[in-house]
Amino acid sequence: MPSDCRLQQLRERVLDLAAAVADPTTGDRTYDEYMRWAGQLYRNYSWGNISLILSARPDAQLCAGYRRWQRLGRQVCYGERGIPIIVPVQGQPVVEPDPLAEEPMVHRPVLAWAVGHVWDISQTSGPPIPNWRVDLGEEAGVLLQAAVSLATQRGIEVEFGSIYGGANGVSKCGRMTINQARPVGIQAATILHEMAHETLHPPGTRNETTRSAHECEAEAVACVVLRHYGYDHVLNGSAVYCRMHGGSARMVLASLERITGMAHSLISGIRCHLPPEFRPQELNL
């Protein structure tokens, strides 16, 4: 069993994160840039259109129309064929009074359906996507491989592949996918986050509490583990992540013991899969 002193040191790191979440000045310029970029790109494709996109291009991640990519500063590469989807043909705006609001409702009726085309980001060229996630650097590859070994040892299947929508990683029912397009340093942080989900939020329990609470817990675990291995600069990014998902310092504090216990479990497990020179000495877990 870990000593009370060791667990207290981990608790203090969770408290540091809670304080950063509560601090309104904690932030990252690239996060704001990412949200502006994403706000121009994301749209609600139907499940039918998502199926069409993935049938035509299984590795698709982020899709948009030709003009939308241009507005984002990217250009569809010469010779790339668009992915067909179904789009509505809308009529002229119709104004209708709304008895429950001061302003009238304005909508455009759908007159028919037609075939439109979108292109995946891999079919475009231009400035890179702003990614507010801190890249831990290539040296984090050692930590990534140790985490993969631990996940496999615990019966979690890990694969590296494409994720539609551009998420860094997803996990469910003992299987996780890490976005192969992300730098190694982001993959390392992501797998820790997803491993926390797999243990703390198994199927059947994910509806018992809010998604924001789950994200806060998983991100706090990843933050504590990374700080243990010397990546202190992830603190601000983790605080921003928690706030982005509707989390709060109170949520982090309410889950203090769950986060501490999970972080200790990952640190202890990963340690066994690391080369001796990579193992930190400060906690000796």
Image: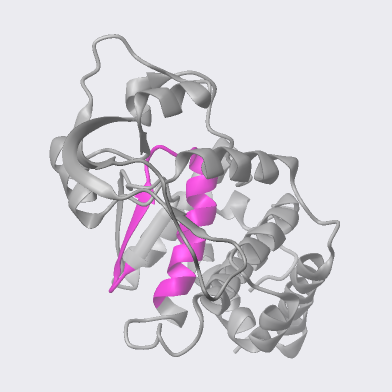
Comparing 93 with 226, the one in front is 93
Q: Is residue 284 left or right of residue 181?
A: right
User: Residue 250 appears at what percent x and percent y?
Assistant: 73, 82
The answer to whether 80 is drawn above or below residue 1 in the figure is above
The picture quadrant where one finds residue 118 is top left
Name the residue: 84% across, 62% down. 24
Residue 221 pos. (x, y %):
59, 70
- Relative depth, front residue between 208 and 70: 70
Determine whether, in the image, residue 228 is placed left or right of residue 99: right
- Residue at position x 55%, y 36% in the image: 138
Point 38% across, 60% down: residue: 170
Count the marks: how many? Answer: 0
By what rule are the colours in the image chosen? one colour
Image quarter hosting the N terminus: bottom right
Q: Which residues are magenta?
A: 172-198
Asked if residue 252 lies in the magenta stretch, the reply is no
Left or right: where does residue 280 sit relative to residue 101? right
Image vertical order of residue 53 relative to residue 167, above or below: above
Q: Looking at the image, is 104 positioned above or below residue 159?
A: below
Q: In the rendered image, is residue 138 in sight?
A: yes
Could you tell me residue 35's position as x and y percent? Answer: 61, 45
Find out whether residue 173 is within the magenta segment.
Answer: yes
Mark yes or no: residue 228 visible. Answer: no
As drawn, the residue found furthest toward the top would be 78
The extreme left residue here reads 55
Q: Nearer the viewer, residue 216 or 72?
A: 72
Q: Quadrant of residue 92?
A: top left
Residue 258 x/y as whole percent:
59, 85
Picture quarter with the C terminus: bottom right
